[in-house]
C-alpha cells in the first residue's frame, strides 16, 4: 500500500528508477498535484505542476542521450517527518559521444501518503550541458534571459 512508504522508501524508489533508466515509471511516485521546483534550471528556473507535466519531463529524459548513475548518496532526516533531504552525485554518460562527468545534486522532498508532494531539485545544469557539448549554448541562453 503506497501510504505505508516512508520518505526514504520513496527516495530509494526514485533513485533506483533513475539508475535503471525506468524514466516512464517514475511519475507514479508523485501525487496527482505534485510540484517540482528546479530553482537552478537554466536559462530560467523551472516548475512542473501536476503528474502530467512530471510525466512529460521524465518521458523526455527517456528519449535523451544521457544516462545517470547515483553515487555518494547521503540522506538527511529533518524535524518534519514528511521531509527528507538527499545529497548525491550523478555519474553522467552521454551515450552518443561517450563523454562523462560527475554532477552534484541536492533534492528536498516532501512525501505524504507514500507519494511525492513537492521537491526542490538543485542540479548542476552547466555540467549537464557540458557533457552534451552544449555549455556555450546554455551560457548564451542565460545571457539572453538576463536582458
Image: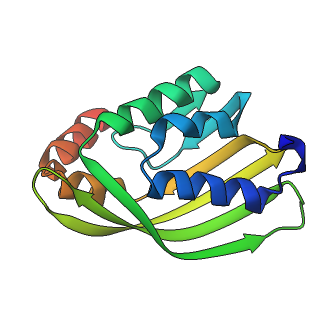
Q: Report the number of numbered marks.
A: 0
* Percent coordinates x, y for residue 126 in the rendering: 29, 56
| Nearest the eye: 24 or 117 | 24
Q: Residue at x 34, y 53 (%)?
A: 125
Q: Residue at x 89, y 60 (%)?
A: 80
Q: Residue at x 23, y 41 (%)?
A: 143
* Quarter occupied by residue 35: top right
Judge whether residue 147 can be spotted in this image: no
* Percent coordinates x, y for residue 91 in the rendering: 35, 68
Relative to 36, is 136 on the left or the right? left
Relative to 20, is 102 on the left or the right? left
Relative to 111, is 68 on the left or the right? left
* Quarter occupied by residue 93: bottom left
Q: Residue at x 45, y 58 (%)?
A: 19
On screen, residue 108 above or below 33: below
| Nearest the eye: 23 or 112 | 23
* Percent coordinates x, y for residue 90 in the rendering: 40, 65
Which quarter of the figure is the N terminus placed in?
top right
* Quarter occupied by residue 141: top left
Looking at the picture, the colour scheme in use is rainbow
On screen, residue 37 above or below 48: below
* Percent coordinates x, y for residue 71 in the rendering: 46, 74
Which quarter of the figure is the C terminus placed in?
top left
Judge whether residue 32 can be spotted in this image: yes
Amino acid at each position: 500500500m503506497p501510504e505505508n512508504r516512508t520518505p526514504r522508501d520513496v527516495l530509494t524508489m526514485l533513485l533506483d528508477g533513475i539508475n535503471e533508466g525506468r524514466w516512464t515509471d517514475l511519475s507514479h511516485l508523485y501525487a496527482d498535484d505534485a510540484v517540482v521546483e528546479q530553482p537552478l534550471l537554466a536559462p530560467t528556473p523551472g516548475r512542473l505542476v501536476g503528474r502530467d507535466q512530471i510525466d512529460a519531463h521524465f518521458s523526455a529524459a527517456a528519449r535523451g542521450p544521457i544516462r545517470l548513475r547515483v553515487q555518494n548518496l547521503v540522506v538527511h532526516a529533518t524535524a518534519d517527518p514528511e521531509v527528507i533531504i538527499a545529497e548525491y552525485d550523478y555519474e553522467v554518460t552521454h551515450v552518443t559521444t561517450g563523454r562523462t562527468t560527475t554532477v552534484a545534486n541536492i533534492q528536498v522532498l516532501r512525501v505524504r501518503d507514500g507519494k511525492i508532494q513537492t521537491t526542490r531539485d538543485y542540479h548542476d545544469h552547466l555540467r549537464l550541458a557540458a557533457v552534451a557539448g552544449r555549455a556555450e549554448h546554455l551560457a548564451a541562453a542565460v545571457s539572453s534571459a538576463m536582458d
